[in-house]
């Protein structure tokens, strides 16, 4: 380095020529010329990159493997050694591993993707679904949490469903918009199958072919839908961060609730506290669109089989037996199933999510049981109804291995549908104690529970004449007559 400095000072300060310095110091004139042009030794430099006769044909393959690794779990990505092994085993590479490791290190050292700082615009939202384990009525189940966030104010709304599908997706929107007090003007999503149609290969760019159910949802609420690029969670970072926050605060440890409604009430109360404490929510609220009167649901046509059951998504739901063989309309919501004949609702059931399950209502089969009373002992609708023990005790009391005893029990079931299970249960307790077996006597015992005083009965007369008025005395008055006669 001292010689280097002496050469440069001799030429640039003392004014000596390159030839003179070369003779004095015994250096090649070319070397002296290079020293004069560079303030520090430049080191060894290549005029052109070294060739890669063995590795060159595999460079694109290495880059493709590293590109695919960006979408893989962090602990399941390729190391340089693993890439070398794959090149040898799968693609016939015959070179050394050092070249492969050096090239992988060079690629990984390239500058990462840069991002632009953004601001959140009032009235816009981000939406996503995430899974978490929950405990409902003592049973651990996988819950699917619908989460919508207003990034400007950081106000959020969450609701949990047993299943992630088009119905829960639409219902989550309806609940979130009601909670916010209006419809977000623009919402960012990933690419769920119940919103974006599949079958056209990998999703690229911004254009999407939307499902009919999502198009209807947009048409009802008039919001703009924007779909993020695949594997680009940063494009909806607010909801991704909020998912982590909600999961850590509400789902750790695993939450316990008696029902999905109770669990969702917990989420609602937490979200309400955040909304009430947000200093900027009024800015979001001012930009929201008006809220329409709309209840989302999925409509499906289904035929009633000979067991008076309708099949929907591998589960079976009962309808009144007079509809056997007819096509009815099923209105599916996240937690319930409604079945209609034209505009008349004929059945309402809690929704099943386990394959092959049955939901029946015993009242749907009463007319048929009155014609086929011997089936009542093993009838699924009766067993699923979960009647109190008094009903089974009465059935055993009247059972006589003929249809007469079964008809009595069916008549009691008819009373339960007319007056309610609790009132019939109370009447059956008295009937069992007194040895009463006739349904007409049980009916009197039930009606005594309504005996609160005189009741006036009026009839309508279409001819315009004055209508008679009859005052029915309470049953206790008739009981006094029986005591006198005795």
Image (cartoon, rainbow, N blue to C red):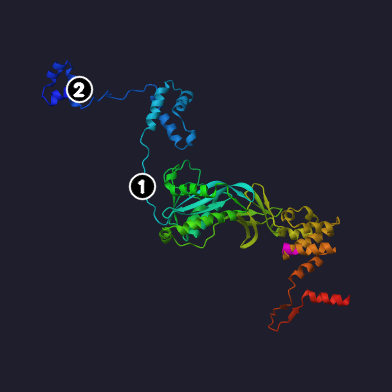
Name the residue beneath numbered marker 1: 117
Residue contact at pointers 2 and 1, CB within 8 angstroms? no
383 or 269: nearer the eye? Answer: 269
280 or 57: nearer the eye? Answer: 280
Can you say which quadrant of the picture contains the N terminus?
Answer: top left
Labels 2 and 1: the sequence-earlier one: 2
Name the residue beneath numbered marker 2: 4
Q: Residue furthest left?
A: 15
Query: Dominant secondary structure of the magenta stretch?
Result: helix
The magenta segment: 420-424
* Residue 238 locus on image (x, y percent): 44, 49
Nearest to the eye among marks 2 and 1: give it: 2
32 or 466: nearer the eye? Answer: 32
Q: Secondary structure at mark 2?
A: helix
Q: Residue at x 38, y 27 (%)?
A: 103
Q: Residue at x 40, y 56 (%)?
A: 122
């Amino acid at each position: 380095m001292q010689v280097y400095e002496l050469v440069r000072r001799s030429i640039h300060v003392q004014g000596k020529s390159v030839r003179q310095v070369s003779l004095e110091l015994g250096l090649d004139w070319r070397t002296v010329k290079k020293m004069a042009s560079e303030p520090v030794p430049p080191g060894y430099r290549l005029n052109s990159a070294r060739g890669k006769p063995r590795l060159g044909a595999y460079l694109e393959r290495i880059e493709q493997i590293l590109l695919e690794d960006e979408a893989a779990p962090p602990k399941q990505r390729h190391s340089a050694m693993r890439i070398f092994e794959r090149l040898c085993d799968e693609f016939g590479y015959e070179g050394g591993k050092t070249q492969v490791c050096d090239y992988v290190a060079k690629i990984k050292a390239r500058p990462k993707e840069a991002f632009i700082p953004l601001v959140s615009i009032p009235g816009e939202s981000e939406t996503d679904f995430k899974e978490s384990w929950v405990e409902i009525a003592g049973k651990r189940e996988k819950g699917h949490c619908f989460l919508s966030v207003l990034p400007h104010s950081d106000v959020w709304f969450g609701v949990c469903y047993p299943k992630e599908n088009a119905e829960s997706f639409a219902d989550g929107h309806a609940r979130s918009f009601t909670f916010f007090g209006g419809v977000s003007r623009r919402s960012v999503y990933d690419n769920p199958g119940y919103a974006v149609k599949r079958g056209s290969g990998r999703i690229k760019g911004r254009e999407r072919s939307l499902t009919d159910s999502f198009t209807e949802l947009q048409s009802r609420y008039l919001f703009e839908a924007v779909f993020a690029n695949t594997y680009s969670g940063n494009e909806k970072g607010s909801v991704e961060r909020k998912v982590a926050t909600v999961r850590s605060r509400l789902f750790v440890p695993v939450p316990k609730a008696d029902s999905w409604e109770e669990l969702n009430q917990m989420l609602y109360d937490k979200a309400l506290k955040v909304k009430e404490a947000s200093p900027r929510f009024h800015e979001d609220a001012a930009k929201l669109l008006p809220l329409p009167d709309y209840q989302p649901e999925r409509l499906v046509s289904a035929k009633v089989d000979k067991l008076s059951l309708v099949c929907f998504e591998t589960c079976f739901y009962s309808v009144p037996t007079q509809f056997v063989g007819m096509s009815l309309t099923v209105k599916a919501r996240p937690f319930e199933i409604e079945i209609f004949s034209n505009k008349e609702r004929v059945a309402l059931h809690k929704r099943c999510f386990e394959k092959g399950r049955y939901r029946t209502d015993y009242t749907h089969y009463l007319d048929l049981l009155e014609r086929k009373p011997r089936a009542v002992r093993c009838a699924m609708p009766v067993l699923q109804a979960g009647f109190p023990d008094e009903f089974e005790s009465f059935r055993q009391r009247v059972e006589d291995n003929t249809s007469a005893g079964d008809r009595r029990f069916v008549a009691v079931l008819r009373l339960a549908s007319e007056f309610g299970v609790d009132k019939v249960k109370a009447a059956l307790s008295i009937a069992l104690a007194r040895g009463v077996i006739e349904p007409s006597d049980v009916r009197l015992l039930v009606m005594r529970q309504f005996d609160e005083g005189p009741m006036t009965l009026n009839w309508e007369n279409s001819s315009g004449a004055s209508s008679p008025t009859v005052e029915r005395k309470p049953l206790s008055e008739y009981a006094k007559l029986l005591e006198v006669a005795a």
